[in-house]
Image (tube, rainbow, N blue to C red):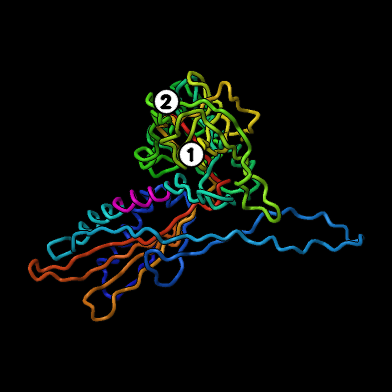
Amino acid sequence: MAVTFGQEGLIVPKTLAADALMQLNLMSIFSKAALGGFREGEFEKGATVQFRRIKITDAEDYDPRGNTEANTTDPGYLVGDLSLENLFTNAVPVYSSDYQIEKYISEVGPQMAFSITKKFDLALYNKFRTPTHASTGNVSYGVNMPIRIVAAHKDTAFQPFNQDLLINAAAGLEEEDVPPGDLYAILATRAKAHYLGEMTPVDAGAVYANAGVAALLQQGFPIGQFVQRMGFMVGGSNIIGRHGSQAAVADLDTASSAQASLAIASITANTAFTKADYAGTQPVLGALDLVLTCTGLQNVAVGQIAKLGADNATATAFGVVLRVDAPNKTVTLVPFSLDGQQLSASDLSTSTDKFSIPKISSVNIAYKKQGLVFDTRKMAAPPENSGAQMVGAMDEQSGLLLQIWQGSYDVNRLRSTTRYTLLCGSKFVDYRMGCFMLSL
């Protein structure tokens, strides 16, 4: 339930803020599928909020009768900054006496919520797709985008989304050395449609009826809502449908003839990337350096998803590009098989596997909820006697906070202006808690 705040007597804007915030919580997929936070105080865009988590250690099986002391080493913390980098804002019609209050709120509140929902959900989805590590030198990979991948791919093409992707993603997430947590899966619009079709055969019978599929046949799979499947809370998002794809690269070679795939000359282990979440010596991440056969490497960027495999066959592996050394024709990535198992150099072949950047229609995501965090903060109210006023509403459950500002009276129009804002930042705090699910 929203709690309103601000100057006394501003009943209409406070009611509008509370209604818009309720609508925002209903429309946004990530308001329910991420950990939100709020802290008292007044902040500006660009301010940072620090978070930390304890590094991983194993308990000691200690014998008090021995002559050695028990381990007293503090494992320490992995610390990160979350920047309040987003200030979503828009203008709304000003309430006047020719409006009925109920009609004004019922019309304006949903418009406010939808305007912010699109930007808010896209900002959180982009945390899965945006690399933040250093482009050179050693990297302790921890508070970074996910790299694990599962894929529905056969012969030369991606296949419709199916339940095997959820099963394999769950296995990959649960085998990581991280605390257990609630699993969420957000699907692109087309992937959601394919999965709905797979879940609802006409001859489903009692098993599917008992699993709640009968309700899905009647209600569909509404955006912003979740159903429980394969250990996940599964939801759909048209944000991923419109922004969660990857374009194919048609020419990777600077030579005159276009080359959509390149042969791999050599594969060696990369030791510059290590796992940040371990006290003491950090184990290697498992990245590989692929030296590609070409005149000159082009059109490859960090964060792209690469395919490894023969041109006219099912992919051997997929991997997120972590580093590109164009002068040395080298690409660094961690390869994963279609079922999400991490591969080593011996699992790949320089004679048959080739490197390419394929077209991917749906880059769906699976993750542990505690891996995706956001924070909202309140901005300072206008000074007294400034002619401006501020009210707002905060949802204690989701952590979202919305403010409404009024002021700047226009004598030519005999009205003031009204604007609403949401100041927030977000981050994916542990790469091991996320997984990409690639499908048609």
Residue farthest to the left?
A: 412
Identified at 45% across, 50% down, the residue is: 32
* Number of marks drawn: 2
Please say whether residue 142 is visible from this viewpoint. Answer: yes
Q: Is residue 393 left or right of residue 140?
A: left
| x, y percent for residue 436 | 50, 38
SS for tag 1? helix
For the magenta stretch, what is the residue range? Answer: 114-125
Q: Which mark is residue 327?
A: 1
The C terminus: image quadrant: top left
Judge whether residue 323 is colored magenta: no
Instruction: Out of 341 and 62, give the one closest to the viewer.
Output: 341
Residue farthest to the bottom?
A: 385
Q: Is residue 294 left or right of residue 106?
A: right
Above or below for 235 versus 57: above
| x, y percent for residue 44 | 37, 68
Identified at 54% across, 53% down, the residue is: 143
Please say whether residue 162 is visible from this viewpoint. Answer: no
Identified at 65% across, 45% down, the residue is: 284
Above or below for 71 versus 348: below
Crowding around mark 1 (Cα neighbors within 10 Å: few <14, some 14 to 19, many 20+) is: few
Name the mark nearer the viewer: 1 or 2.
Answer: 1
Crowding around mark 2 (Cα neighbors within 10 Å: few <14, some 14 to 19, many 20+) is: some
Q: Which residue is mark 2?
A: 259
Q: Amino acid at mark 2?
A: Gln
The N terminus: image quadrant: bottom left
| x, y percent for residue 149 | 53, 36
Q: Are marks 1 and 2 in contact (CB under 8 Å)?
A: no
Judge whether residue 122 is colored magenta: yes
Q: Amino acid at mark 1?
A: Pro
The dominant secondary structure in magenta is helix
